[in-house]
């Protein structure tokens, strides 16, 4: 993990958070997808592909943060397994991949938050 991710993970654990290594056997009212960000440029495989599939199968609405996991932020193409979000909130700038390729099948309702960045 990069240093900033390690620090965020340690802070999460320190405040009582936990991380699951298997998909929980629970019902969810909402899933927030922040698994991968805008930099992914390869197919999602292994446990991560399994988690994306489980996310879709549980039937809960999915809110994607910045871009649905598995969607290319430049082309809008899905890298194999990808999240079909009910809604996506994207930050600072609109990513062209939210409007191209097969993005319409993955993004859901799109909201933009500029976070005060000009």
Image (spheres, rainbow, N blue to C red):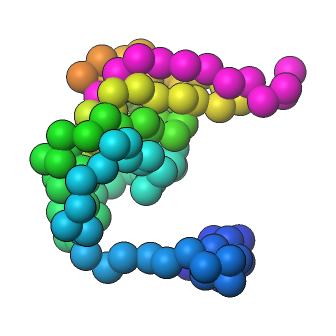
Q: Residue shown at 34%/43% (left/top)?
A: 29
> Considering depth in this image, is 60 or 94 the residue closer to the camera?
60
Figure check: 58 above or below 14: above
Q: Residue 116's spot in the image, x, y percent? A: 85, 26
Relative placement, left or right, of 34 versus 72 is right
Q: Residue shown at 54%/36% (left/top)?
A: 66
Figure check: 4 above or below 52: below
Residue 45 in sight from this viewpoint:
no
Q: Residue 45's spot in the image, x, y percent? A: 22, 64
Q: Residue shown at 42%/36% (left/top)?
A: 63
Figure check: 84 above or below 35: above
Magenta stretch in the rendered image: 106-118
Relative placement, left or right, of 14 versus 19 is right
In the figure, residue 72 lies in which quadrant? top left
Q: Residue 55's spot in the image, x, y percent? A: 24, 50
Q: Which residue lies furthest to the left in this view?
A: 57
- Chief secondary structure of the magenta portion: loop
Does the segment drawn in magenta span residue 89?
A: no
Residue 31 in sight from this viewpoint:
yes
């Amino acid at each position: 993990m990069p240093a900033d991710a390690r620090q965020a993970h340690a802070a999460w654990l320190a405040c009582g958070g936990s991380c699951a290594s298997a998909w929980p056997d629970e019902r969810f009212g909402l899933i927030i997808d922040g698994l991968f960000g805008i930099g992914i440029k390869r197919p999602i495989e292994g446990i991560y592909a399994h988690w994306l599939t489980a996310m879709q199968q549980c039937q809960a609405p999915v809110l994607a943060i910045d871009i649905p996991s598995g969607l290319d932020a430049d082309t809008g193409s899905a890298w194999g397994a990808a999240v079909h979000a009910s809604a996506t909130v994207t930050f600072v700038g609109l990513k062209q991949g939210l409007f191209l390729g097969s993005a319409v099948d993955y993004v859901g309702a799109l909201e933009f938050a500029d976070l005060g960045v000009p």
